[in-house]
Image (cartoon, helix red, strand yellow):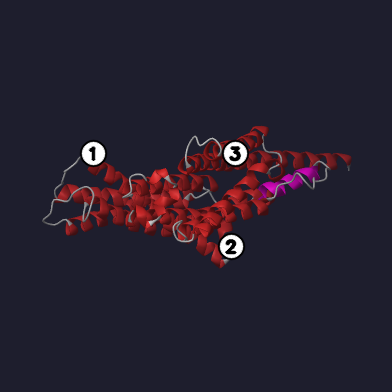
Amino acid sequence: MEQETRKLPQRSAGVELDIERHALWTGLICSVLGLAVGLMLFSGQQPALYGGLSIGSVAAVAGAVAAAGSSAWGYKYLLIRREPWLQGLSIWRWGLISFSLILVHAAIAVMGLSVFFHLMQRSFLGLRLDLFAGSALVAVAAGVSAYIAMEATARTTAQSLSVVLGGFMVAGIMLSMLLAENPVWWQTMFSTLGTFDSGVLSFWTFNTTLLVTGLVLATFSEFLLRDLVQLARAHARRAAARGQKLSRIFRPRPKMVRICLLVVAGGVMLAAVVPVNTLGDLHAAGVWAAAAALIVMLGGSMFLFPGFPMIFHLLSFAALGGMWLAMLLWLEWEYFNLTGFELAAVAILFGWISAFIRTTSAMLDVVQEKLASEELLAVQSSRAQS
């Protein structure tokens, strides 16, 4: 009965060991290749840490290629074994998930390594390394990127994707700010980083960050939908086991939650492909659509997620109230500008999403356990009566 409720992923000891073995081999191979690339490109030079043909730029490209290849391998040969339900998806949904995972891990490698070497260059101003030291750093960057991407992809869950998404957004926004040629961009709004007024590098970094974030959100909705559907089925079966009827109002609605997440993803991607200084109204429409979908989930917490702990619903209402307060501080009281409001809104919403994912996972485990006990008790009671 319990297996009918939830088809558990194949997380056997053999699969977990295979993931670790593949990750170590991939890291080693990419390290050797990265070392070879560094020795070829830095021959006869003393490369700087960042800028031009530097250790940072070569490490970022090598890390991205290593991460992309490892992620593709990890998805096709390891994640499918660990999460067999992925094989039942349509081709376009399967392809979207694989493309998103490959792209986000490659982008994280580029942005994370770029931020690291950029900060190191500022910290050690004027430092140049010899051929072997520079090549060794490239080798380490490629190897670590490959290892992390393999581990992260092969063990992808809704919880891990939320961590990946958060790390990627922080790295992308930080890099956009570091690369901005306009030092007072913050006096207007965050979207200024996505215009050519802040420089070409900032423009591409910021908009790429938003675009990949939207793709990852769409991928994230697939994994979260899986958990929510299982939770809704268990909720219905528990009611049947206890002889109760499901409420028409307070019942899990996984499809509505997925639609809201897809609207958020679409709004973010629209804001990425339409910079604010081109079609400002269309850019704003994407932002407001994403905000509206999130507000629906926050305000409808008790209707969409019945059975969740009361503290979670209080957190949802607190997040909604926090966004309203931030808007008042911006529009009515002029305590901070639009950039301040955007910072507050993003922090509140992604904090709530993280709590939502963890609560959903914990709720699913609890409901599964209670369902198994109640169905077993019902069977024993039936046998005793007969």
Work out how far the residue at label 2 is from the one at label 3, CA to CA, in angstroms.
39 Å
Work out how far the residue at label 2 is from the one at label 1, CA to CA, in angstroms.
48 Å
Tag shown at residue 324: 3
Tag shown at residue 21: none
Work out how far the residue at label 1 is from the one at label 3, CA to CA, in angstroms.
40 Å
Q: Residue 324 falls in which quadrant of the image?
A: top right
Of badges 2 and 3, the one in the foreground is 3
Magenta stretch in the rendered image: 229-241
On the rendered structure, is 257 left or right of 108? Answer: right
Tag shown at residue 89: 2
On the rendered structure, is 356 left or right of 20? Answer: right
Of badges 2 and 1, the one in the foreground is 1
Most foreground residue, 49 or 146: 49
Most foreground residue, 172 or 187: 187
Label 1 SS: helix
Q: Mark 2 or 1 closer to N-term?
A: 2
Q: In what quadrant of the picture does the C terminus appear?
A: top right
Give above or below for 356 relative to 229.
Answer: above
The 10 Å Cα crowd at callout 1, few under 14, some 14 to 19, many 20 or more, is few
Main secondary structure type of the part rendered in magenta: helix
Q: Which residue is mark 1?
A: 123
The 10 Å Cα crowd at callout 3, few under 14, some 14 to 19, many 20 or more, is some
Residue 237 highlighted magenta (yes or no):
yes
Q: Position of residue 160 (x, y in %)?
A: 49, 46
The three-letter amino acid code for the residue at tag 3 is: Trp
